[in-house]
Image: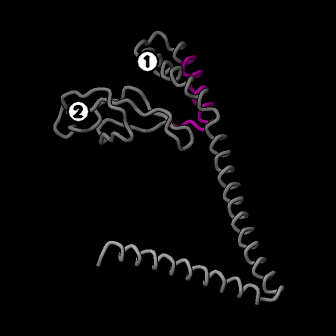
Amino acid sequence: MSKKDKNNKVEDSQVEDQATSTVEGDVETQQEELKSPEEQLQDQLIVEKDKFMRLFAEFENYKKRTTKERIELFKTASQDVVMAMLPILDDFERALSHIEDDKEAEELRKGVLLIYNKLQNTLEQKGLSVIEVRQGDVFNADNHEAVTQIPAPTDDLKGKIIDVIERGYKLGEKVIRFPKVVIGQ
């Protein structure tokens, strides 16, 4: 078969495809013309109802999403203030640990403890909670921040938490500061 014959066959098949699609389009047009005006209106009504239902569903999803975002915003609106207060809370804890060593400063310790408890209660009312970490807990990089590694005093503490340097905190369900820990090698 020559190149010219192949080209003619390709052109012929393209002409047939166009004719077929034209005939199919004409058949659909004729079928629509054969439908009564009521049937055409019913078809349009079905199409419009479908569009309406989709739009309504999109709007409902939008309302749910914005409501959820608003609730999250209210829960964490005070995050900046609480984050700024955490170093003060840490300083109180350090002061209390140093004052406990001094037996003569009992009145000072009571005053500092009173202020510390008041600050802690206020922050807890705003949704702050301590992430509990103890010596001997298994280290998990998703939940803890390792500051350093030291040789484990015993074999059972290898890969576990030896000491907690800084407490971790959550505001609502969101972690705002991971606990800083020392782990054993």
Quarter of the image with the N terminus is bottom left
Residue count near mark 1 (Cα–Cα under 10 Å), binned few <14, some 14–19, many ≥20: few
Residue 84: image x %, image y %? 56, 23
Residue type at the position of mark 1: Glu
Quarter of the image with the C terminus is top left
Cα gap from disc 1 to disc 2, whole angstroms: 28 Å
Residue 42: image x %, image y %? 79, 82
- The residue located at (43%, 38%) in the rendering is 132
Along the line of sight, which residue is nearer the eye, 32 or 19? 19
Looking at the image, tell me whether mark 1 or mark 2 is earlier in sequence order.
1
Of the two numbered discs 1 and 2 in the rendering, the one whose residue sits closer to the viewer: 2
Q: Does 114 lie within the magenta span?
A: yes
Along the line of sight, which residue is nearer the eye, 111 or 73? 73
Residue type at the position of mark 2: Gly
Residue located beneath label 2 in the image:
184
**Rendered position, 126 above or below 34:** above
Along the line of sight, which residue is nearer the eye, 149 or 16? 16
* Disc ID at residue 100: 1
Any part of residue 100 in sight: yes
Extent of the magenta region: 110-129
Locate residue 16 relative to residue 127 in the image: left or right.
left
